[in-house]
Amino acid sequence: MQADGPRACRFGRRWYLNNESWHPSVPPFGEMKCILCWCVSGETHCQRQECPPAACASPARRDNPCCAKCRGECERSHVATAPPNTR
């Protein structure tokens, strides 16, 4: 006899409800903040956070430990700038 409704997912030693999402914990590394897993009808799906490539020589991971950004990029993103010249 099958259960009515969506099934839960097992990941490691934990169970997750349908549509629940989490950052997996993998020994000996601990919680993997750059990976998101979710449960869909009894199946676990995981995906690494996608990051745009940094366009500088030495990007840093300050605000977001998963994605590297060029220094000053966060500060510049809050400053209004004129649109680029089109010739």
Image (cartoon, helix red, strand yellow):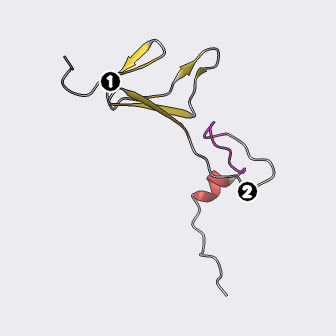
The earlier-in-sequence mark between 2 and 1 is 1
Using the image as rendered, state which of residue 78 and residue 33 is in the foreground.
33
Per the model, the C-alpha gap separating discs 2 and 1 is 40 Å
Using the image as rendered, state which of residue 13 and residue 67 is in the foreground.
13
Q: Specify whether 14 is left or right of 54.
A: left
Circle number at residue 55: 2
* Rendered residue at 51%/24% (across/down): 24
Q: Which one is closest to the eye, mark 2 or mark 1?
A: 1
* Rendered residue at 64%/84% (across/down): 86
Mark 1: which amino acid? Leu
Q: Quadrant of the C terminus?
A: bottom right
Give the dominant element type of the magenta stretch: helix, strand or loop: loop
* Crowd tier of the residue under label 2, counting other residues whose Cα lies within 10 Å: few below 14, some 14–19, many 20 or above: few
Residue 56: image x %, image y %?
77, 54
* Crowd tier of the residue under label 1, counting other residues whose Cα lies within 10 Å: few below 14, some 14–19, many 20 or above: some
Residue 51: image x %, image y %?
61, 47
* Rendered residue at 63%/52% (across/down): 52
- Residue that carries the numbered disc 1 in the rendered image: 17
SS class of the residue under badge 2? loop
Residue 16: image x %, image y %?
37, 21
SS class of the residue under badge 1? loop
- For this orientation, the residue located farthest to the front is 1
- For this orientation, the residue located farthest to the top is 13
**Which span is picked out in magenta?**
62-71
* Rendered residue at 64%/19% (across/down): 29
Q: Specify whether 67 is left or right of 14.
A: right
Mark 2: which amino acid? Ala
Figure check: 45 above or below 75: above
